[in-house]
Image: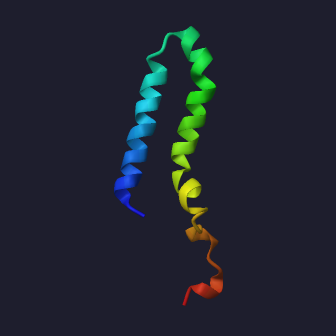
Amino acid sequence: MSTKTDVEAIRLIGDEVVRLLSLPDDRLDAEAAVGLRLIADLARWRDLAYGPAPCASGRSSSARH
């Protein structure tokens, strides 16, 4: 998996945050849930595309030789 793709996801998340924060209050109220869902999906893009990645802290003690 490419760090370039990670960077693109971060940029897209930032763009959506800026878009939401620039909305007037009435439109922000109307679009907040959809915007937050998009941000969450972008933050989870790896899980959505490739399945969950194993956690580094999830290693068993026997794996540390």
**Left or right of 47 in this view: 17:** left
> Where residue 64 sits: x, y (%)?
56, 85
> Where residue 1 sits: x, y (%)?
42, 64
Quick one: 62 or 11, which is closer to the camera? 11
- The furthest residue to the left: 4
The relative height of residue 31 versus residue 35 in the rendered view (above or below) is above
> Where residue 26 sits: x, y (%)?
58, 9
The image's colouring method is rainbow
> Where residue 31 sits: x, y (%)?
58, 21
Which residue is found at the position 63% from the left and 71% from the top?
58
Which residue is found at the position 61% from the left and 76% from the top?
59
The relative height of residue 30 versus residue 33 in the rendered view (above or below) is above
Which residue is found at the position 52% from the left and 56% from the top?
46
The relative height of residue 23 versus residue 45 in the rendered view (above or below) is above
Q: In which quarter of the image is residue 30?
A: top right
Q: How many marks?
A: 0
Which residue is found at the position 57% from the left and 43% from the top?
41
The relative height of residue 6 versus residue 21 in the rendered view (above or below) is below
- The furthest residue to the bottom: 65
The C terminus, quarter of image: bottom right
- The furthest residue to the front: 49
Quick one: 17 or 35, which is closer to the camera? 35
